Image (cartoon, helix red, strand yellow):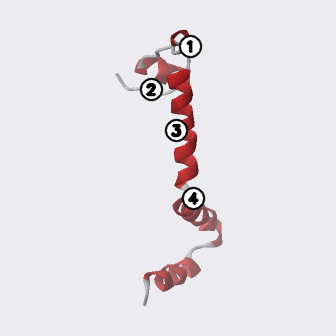
Amino acid sequence: MSKRELAIQLLDEVPEYKLGYVLAFIQGLTADESGDDAYCEALYQDYLSAPEEDKEMVSLEDAAKMLGVNLGV
């Protein structure tokens, strides 16, 4: 049995309420990463071309506070 056939067989055993998780996972696996790479590259180039006064440095601790993340330190 091929891996594809096994995956389809296992999919038939997944409860209906869990299919959304499986679908999201498969969509993530098949996503076009080149679009993500192009977006990240554009952000980076924008940063490089920005004036120095627009490049505000933020410490890890301050960034964590802004995002509501507890670093546990």
Pinpoint residue 50: horizontal percent, then vertical percent. 56, 19
Q: Which mark is residue 54?
A: 1
Question: CA–CA distance between discs 2 and 4?
Answer: 31 Å
Question: CA–CA distance between discs 4 and 3?
Answer: 18 Å
Identify the image quadrant of residue 71. Answer: top left
Q: Dot 3, crowdedness within 10 Å: few (<14), some or many (≥20)?
A: few
Tell me, yes or no, whether the two marked residues, 3 and 1, touch with CB atoms within 8 Å: no
In terms of sequence position, does the residue under pointer 2 or pointer 4 come before the other?
Answer: 4
Which residue type does callout 1 highlight? Asp
Mark 1 secondary-structure assignment: helix
Q: Is residue 71 left or right of residue 63?
A: left
Question: CA–CA distance between discs 3 and 2?
Answer: 29 Å
Which image quadrant: the C terminus?
top left
Residue hosting label 3: 41
Q: Dot 2, crowdedness within 10 Å: few (<14), some or many (≥20)?
A: few
Tell me, yes or no, whether the two marked residues, 2 and 1, touch with CB atoms within 8 Å: no
Residue hosting label 2: 70
Pinpoint residue 34: horizontal percent, then vertical percent. 54, 52
Q: Dot 1, crowdedness within 10 Å: few (<14), some or many (≥20)?
A: few
Which residue type does callout 2 highlight? Asn
Which residue type does callout 4 highlight? Ala
Disc 4 vs disc 1: which is toward the camera? 1
Residue hosting label 4: 31
Hey, which residue is sitting farthest top in the picture? 53
Which residue type does callout 3 highlight? Glu
Mark 4 secondary-structure assignment: loop
Tell me, yes or no, whether the two marked residues, 3 and 2, touch with CB atoms within 8 Å: no
Write the residue at 43% across / 86% down.
Answer: 2
Write the residue at 53% across / 30% down.
Answer: 45
In terms of sequence position, does the residue under pointer 3 or pointer 1 come before the other?
Answer: 3
